[in-house]
Image: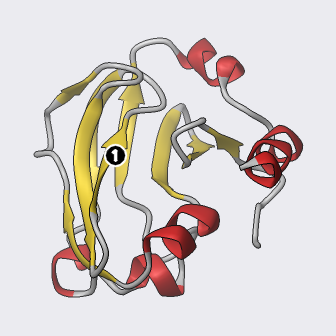
Amino acid sequence: MNTPKELRYSEEHEWVRVEDGKVRIGITDFAQSELGDIVFVELPEVGAELTANEPFGSVESVKTVSELYAPISGKVVEINEELNDNPEFVNESPYEKAWMIVVEPTDLSEIDRLLTAEQYEQMINQE
C-alpha cells in the first residue's frame, strides 16, 4: 500500500497536498484498492464551495458507488477533466494522474486536523 509521507489524509480516505496555498485532493491507494475497478468519477463544478466533511462528488466502481468527502472547506478552482475519459487513472495512479480537484481553502489551518501518513496507516491497518 502506497501512503506518501508528504501528504495529509482524511478518515474518509481522501489525500491532500498543499501547493502554493491551494490544496490538491484525491482518494488514497487504499480507497481505490477497496473499491475495485473505477468506471466513473463525478466531480463538482469549478467555483463550487466545499464544506469540510461534506460530500463533493462520487466514484463509481464495478462494485459500488462511494461518496467523496471534502477534507477541508474552500472553493473549487480546478477539476481533473482527464478523469471523465480515464476513470481508471484512479486505480493506476491515485496520487499523480488521478488527483480530483484543487481547492482554494477557506482556512488552511484545517489541514492540521487531518491525519499524517503514519496515523492514516495505523487507521487502515485496524480496519
Count of labels shown? 1
Q: Which amino acid does label 1 sit on?
A: Leu
Tell me where residue 22 appears, x and y as whole percent: 48, 36
Label 1 sits on residue = 68
User: Dot 1 lies on which element?
Assistant: strand
Residue at point 34%, 23% (across, down): 74
Tell me where residue 9 appears, x and y as whole percent: 65, 41
Residue at point 22%, 47% (across, down): 57
Query: Where 56 falls versus 82 (above or below)?
Result: above
- Report the front residue among 30 and 43: 30
- Report the front residue among 91 and 64: 64
Report which quarter residue 110 is drawn in.
top right
- The color scheme shown is secondary structure
Residue at point 67%, 18% (across, down): 113
Query: Where 57 falls versus 98 (above or below)?
Result: above
Q: In this view, does 28 lie to the left or right of 106?
A: right
Report which quarter residue 1 is drawn in.
bottom right
Q: Residues within 10 Å of mark 1 (few under 14, many from 20)?
A: many
Tell me where residue 87 appears, x and y as whole percent: 28, 80
Q: Is residue 9 left or right of residue 46?
A: right
Q: Is residue 2 left or right of residue 98?
A: right
Tell me where residue 3 appears, x and y as whole percent: 76, 61
Residue at point 40%, 21% (across, down): 52
